[in-house]
Amino acid sequence: MCYSMCPGTVHRCMSDQGCSWISTVLEVFTKFLLNRLVVVASLPQQLEDQRDIGVHYEELNLRLQRRYQGDAITGLLLLYPSCMLHVIESSSEVLVSLLHDLKDMQERSNGVRIEASKVLVMSHNIPRRLFQQWSYKVMNVEAKVGVALNRDSLDVEEDDTETLVRTCLSMLLKLGNHLLKVTKVSKMPLDSLLDEIPEMMVPQHVLVQLLSRTELQSTQQHVQAYHTPINILTCSGHVFGSSCPTTV
């Protein structure tokens, strides 16, 4: 038997009928799994209006929801003066489509563009959503966000990548949990709610540092890894890359 695996998909090919049946079962099983993607990207200096990025994602989300009906998209896009932080919760198919779009935005020569991008985390089968809808927020002033960290940019530069990622994800988790509680009792627009808690926003200089860390995969690298299958032969002693068919 030959197993061919890639993220989110496993095909066990014994016969055409068997492979089709397994693929169908797996598709039904994985369709409703909830996943979360967190990415950071730098914005071009010539970007005149950051809201163009937000509008782009609003339109993209509508197209994806028409294509993947039933796969709700929730999350938060924070647009800083020089970069953006995007949290998206949906099915794996939707998240991969968003990664492809992010890659295209980086490679295109006109239209809505971004520059360097990094994938902070792709979490699969998460128990619940942090956000009840998808929205975006333009951060007007970078100096007033992340006050709760009580550190300056020089300290951040000395932090290792794991610490920076953990700091970013921890702040996002606290922000999401706070919004879940507040939105149950407040009718204020989300934009106004976010204005009241600048200390819970991830500081821009943390994101800038993350963009410079080579340990993190770029969007292009993540997409390439996603589409690269891992082949495992369970009934053969041959090891891939070995010149001897009987090597174990």
Image: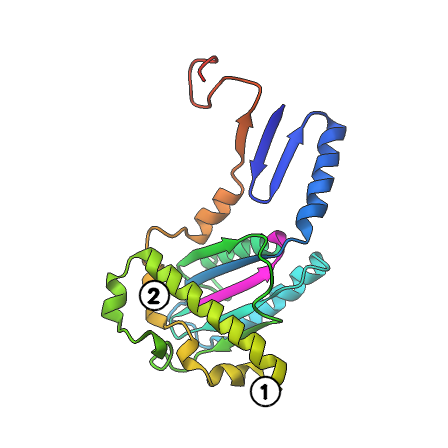
- The amino acid type of the residue labelled 2 equals Val
Check residue 89 for magenta coloring. Answer: yes
Residue for point 60% across, 59% down: 127
Q: Does 33 sit left or right of 104 as displayed?
A: right
Q: How crowded is mark 2: few (under 14 residues within 10 Å), some or many (20 or more)?
A: some
Of labels 1 and 2, the one closer to you: 1
x, y percent for residue 192? 53, 85
- Say the numbered circle drawn on residue 84: none
The crowd level at tag 1 (other Cα within 10 Å; few <14, some 14-19, many 20+) is few
Name the element at disc 1: loop
Among the 4 quarters of the image, the one containing residue 231: top right
Helix, strand or loop status at disc 2: helix
The quadrant of the picture occupied by the C terminus is top left
Q: Mark 2 points at which residue?
A: 208
Out of 121 and 103, give the one closest to the viewer. 121
Is residue 71 visible in the rendered structure shown here?
yes
For the question of whether residue 53 can be seen, the reply is no
**Percent coordinates x, y for residue 81 in the rendering:** 39, 75
Q: What stretch is highlighted in magenta?
A: 84-93
Measuring 62% from the left and 86% from the top, which residue is drawn there? 187
Q: Is the magenta stretch mostly helix, strand or loop?
A: strand
Mark 1 lies on residue: 188
- Is 92 magenta? The answer is yes
